[in-house]
Image (cartoon, rainbow, N blue to C red):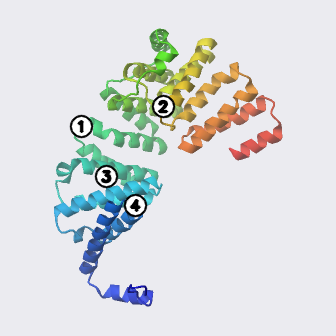
Amino acid sequence: RNGKFYFMHDKLQEAAYSKMKPEERCLHHNRYGLALGFVAVRERDDRLLLTAVTQINHGGPQAVIDDEQAVVVANLNLDAGKKAMYMSDFFAAHSFFEHGISYLRLRREYWNEHYDLSLELFNLAAKCAFMNAEHDSLKMLTDQIMHNAKCFEDKFQAISVTVTLLNWSGNVPAAVELIRTTLSSLDEELPSAVTPTVVKKHLDNTKKQLALLSDDTLLSYLAMVDPSKIFAVELLVKLYGSLTLIGERATQRIIPLRVIQISLTYGMSPHSPSAFAQHGSYLALIEDEFEEGYRYVKFALSLMKKIPSRAHDSTTMFWSTHTRIHIEPMQSSIECYLDAYKAAMKSGNTYAVSSSSVYNNCCLWSGKELNAVVDSMKDT
């Protein structure tokens, strides 16, 4: 038909397929997939690539003819997994990454012989296992990374996902301990006991540094590029969330200050705007320094717009609005909580819950029509 051969019925195709020896099937899947794979790479056809790699994986590691082909197939699985992640199909992506690892395991020393490929496959597989709530698989993957990583920097992703998993599984003290130990290794150790004197010292030091800098000067700061400092800031933000869960408020007070101090030394990170928003709200609402606090809240929003990443906009909006509703007209400024909620829903930020709750409460305080408040609660 149309110059092509077809089976007259699916059962005929299945019968013909079953007549082949298992090893022959594997070999045919492998050859067919590789032929398609090279075409997919040449034509940059993502759909064909996924089909090709699926065929190769039907063949399995036993169909690979040598070590060189095993590495080629592992790389094809890596590319296919990334495409699947881009399409938010984390189950398919995890399968591709696991298959890629299985081809590398044909060599006992694969971590040494193909270190970069191994590290990327394991990190991405761990990320997908986390998204899929496959906790046993995640634990095995991160253990392998921690055992085989050649430098501390290569452990960053595994540590980050482990901290999040510990928090989500209810083992918050272990998450806090892991963060503190890692921060110490990054030369960003926090005080073991945070007293009011320690908080005041951090606050005074931050004020002193910022007093010498105008908003324009701060906005001209370059982006943070040191991987260890970027990771340190990420861990400090995770620590803030962990301490919220166990109610340890004292240490929380110095975390935004530490993030600001790191930002002033090493450049602005995606978390810097939210740290300035928290600092501004603290000055205004706790220290009763409304003018200075409002300045840093507005600066935080300006810096947020300059940062390319939108992942943490909701956090900055949430904290800045705490101060804005005391200075700007409340009926209009509380809508910023709704903006924070929408931004959080787009990025998957947990601040969606806080923003929604505070927004609906503020709607009641501001005298908004009750039917409108009820509709808002249903929507958020």
Residue positioned 64% across, 36% down in the render:
339
Tag 2 secondary structure: loop
Q: Is residue 138 left or right of residue 319?
A: left
Q: Residues within 10 Å of mark 4 (few under 14, many from 20)?
A: some
Tag 3 secondary structure: helix
Q: Residues within 10 Å of mark 2 (few under 14, many from 20)?
A: some
Residue 151 circle label: 1
Residue holding disc 4: 46
Q: Quadrant of the N terminus?
A: bottom left
Tag 1 secondary structure: loop
Residue 304 visible to an observer of this rendering: yes
The disc, 3 or 4, on the residue closer to the chain's N-terminal end is 4
Q: CA distance from mark 2 to mark 4?
A: 31 Å
Callout 3 amino acid? Leu
Residue 263 circle label: none
Q: CA distance from mark 2 to mark 3?
A: 29 Å
